[in-house]
Image: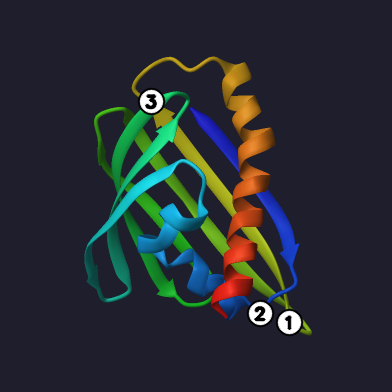
Amino acid sequence: MAEASKVVEMPLPRERIWKAITDYENYPQFVDNVHRVKVLSREGGHTRVEYVIELIGKEIRYVLDHDESRIPDEMTWTFVESALLKGNKGYWRLQSKGEGSTEVSYSIDLEFNFPVPGFIIGGLVRSTLPKMLWNFETRAKKVG
């Protein structure tokens, strides 16, 4: 199991950050290691998305269900299927801090179908998560 979470403050209103977070189809343009994304369905505040990413030297395909019913406060996701993952769940939480600033909380819990050494997971958390959050902040500034 690989768990990671981080809280940062972004100098943007939460609606702009929400827009970047839910712009799944364009993740390959601004999120490192995301190769392809396909929205499979959208219905009643729920979006099913297929991702193809590169992680620890492997191409991984997985499908997640995103619950967007708490716009623009929280988006959660749950695991649907993957050949290389057993699980993937997490959330984005956005709390307005006034004056166009937002506290952003991100959490992910991954479970692999193959052994992953702890030092690799630790490295991913220390380097990948902060950069990913920065990528979303940069995207939110651009898409306004």
Amino acid type at circle 3 is Lys
**From what the image shows, is residue 88 above or below residue 85?**
below
SS at circle 2: loop
Q: Are marks 3 and 2 in contact (CB under 8 Å)?
A: no
Measured from the top left, where is residue 115 in percent x and y? 43, 14
Is tag 3's residue or tag 2's residue first in the polypeptide sequence?
A: 2
How many labels were placed on the picture? 3
The quarter of the displayed image where residue 59 is located: top left
At x 57% / y 66%, what residue is drawn? 139
Please give the residue where the numbered disc 3 appears in the rendered image: 58
Q: Is residue 73 visible?
A: no
Quote the CA–CA distance across marks 3 and 2: 36 Å
Please give the residue where the numbered disc 2 appears in the rendered image: 13
Quadrant occupied by the C terminus: bottom right
Amino acid type at circle 1 is Gly
Is tag 3's residue or tag 1's residue first in the polypeptide sequence?
A: 3
Is tag 2's residue or tag 1's residue first in the polypeptide sequence?
A: 2
Q: Which mark is residue 100?
A: 1
Measured from the top left, where is residue 52 in percent x and y? 32, 42
